[in-house]
Image (cartoon, rainbow, N blue to C red):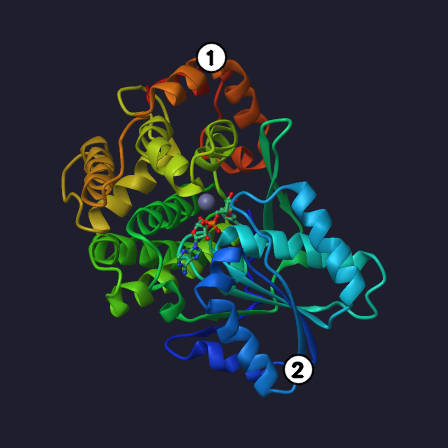
Amino acid sequence: MTTTFSIPTTIYMGSGALDRLQELPIKRALLVCDPFLTKNGASKLVSSRLEAMGAQWELFDRIVPDPTVGLVSAGAACILDYRPDALIALGGGSAIDAGKAINFIYTQMGASEKPLFVAIPTTSGTGSEVTSFSVLSDPKAGAKYPLTDDRMLPEAALLDPSLTLSVPPHVTADTGMDILTHALEAYASPFASDFTDALAEKAIALVFANLPGAVKNGGDFEARERLHNASCMAGIAFNNASLGICHGMAHPLGALLHLPHGRSNALLLPHVAAFNAGLNEQGDFPARARYAALARQSGCCCCYTETVAVQGLIRRIQDLMTETGMPHKLEDEKHRALLAEHLESLAEGALADRCTGGNPRSAQIGQVQELYRKLL
Ligand SMILES: NC(=O)c1ccc[n+]([C@@H]2O[C@H](COP(=O)([O-])OP(=O)(O)OC[C@H]3O[C@@H](n4cnc5c(N)ncnc54)[C@H](O)[C@@H]3O)[C@@H](O)[C@H]2O)c1
Ligand SMILES: [Zn+2]
């Protein structure tokens, strides 16, 4: 099988990366972010640089977590009115994903040239700054849809770790587990290559080494910087390999319970890894050897059998969750009741999700329900 690998986005990284904005050919920009980033002054850091380079700008700061189609429509109306030559998305995955969809609509609706898309992540998690995905929610249907199109890939990503210093501990933990899930799913993907493995392995090592420190001490600049790089590396890995059923299941779960995206992934990840590896089952499960190799390489386990090595990796993930204050199951009684009530539709949603197609093991609806039941 041949596979391809590409990184069309130019990545500027490290302390002061935000200053590199001034090297980009921008004369008129729409800045998209959430209201918190206007309040804490982060959007000013961008707009002041735009002013210094003589560019005009307009602000659309109405982004909310898990952006909806309605929000994207409002953003599209704003961009069609302002007609910029660049869209700068500042924020977590929600702002970057919404920005991608807004820019895509503008590109298709009369922009004279494709507007430059610049992503400035302020969380270390989704890797959206280097992916062709935009995850949008339809609250009425209780569903999240991962849209994908290479034309949504950002032209530039500015990874400035100083922007992530203000991320609170629980968001740091949730988003950090999202990095780990991206890297693990890319690593176990049937479309993985030596190129994506290199990025996934490094991202996993960086998360294990730096996430607990960043959660305990948000001001730890070095830990923040390494996580920011890990997030982007895992994004490149999964954009070129694929995600898998953990994301396929996390999307309907997050839409139903309004859980943070990284939290939904983290809750499911150990169970999905056990399922993919076919632990306690007879048969040929390609993910088993892959996880075992990763476990041995990352020092989770140096042991003899693949099964024991995979168990070591799963334990390492669970320990990281404990260390970063993540729950291992759904704790809220209402959430538990909702999950139990909607098991069938959740499993149907997971099987229909486009990420599930990249999973190394196919699943039947009963097996997906069984995986969801592990959260109770
Ligand atoms: N496009 C992709 O490739 C991709 C991949 C994975 C997930 N996603 C999607 O991305 C979204 C999740 O993104 P996220 O996890 O980054 O969360 P988010 O963007 O929803 O942000 C979470 C919270 O953190 C706050 N925040 C952001 N930056 C901050 C900062 N520097 N300091 C303090 N608070 C800050 C936000 O205001 C928000 O309240 C979901 O919709 C998910 O489905 C997209
Ligand atoms: Zn994710």
Image: 45 above or below 298: below
Instruction: From the image, tell me which residue sits under label 2.
Output: 55
Label 2 and label 1: CA atoms lie apart by 53 Å
Q: Residue at x 27, y 45 (%)?
A: 293
Q: Secondary structure at mark 2?
A: loop
Measured from the top left, where is residue 108 in percent x and y? 81, 57
Q: Residue at x 31, y 48 (%)?
A: 173
- Res. 120 mark: none
Q: Residue at x 48, y 50 (%)?
A: 238
Q: Relative to the observer, which residue lies in front, 18 or 271? A: 18
Instruction: From the image, tell me which residue sits under label 1.
Output: 341
Q: Relative to the observer, which residue lies in front, 272 or 173? A: 173
Q: Can you tell me whether the CB of the residue at mark 2 lies under 8 Å from the nearest atom of ligand 1? A: no
Q: Amino acid at mark 2?
A: Ala
Measured from the top left, where is residue 365 in percent x and y? 50, 16
Front: mark 2 or 1: 2
Q: Quadrant of residue 61?
A: bottom right
Q: Residue at x 37, y 36 (%)?
A: 287
Measured from the top left, where is residue 192 in percent x and y? 46, 48
Image: 180 above or below 151: above
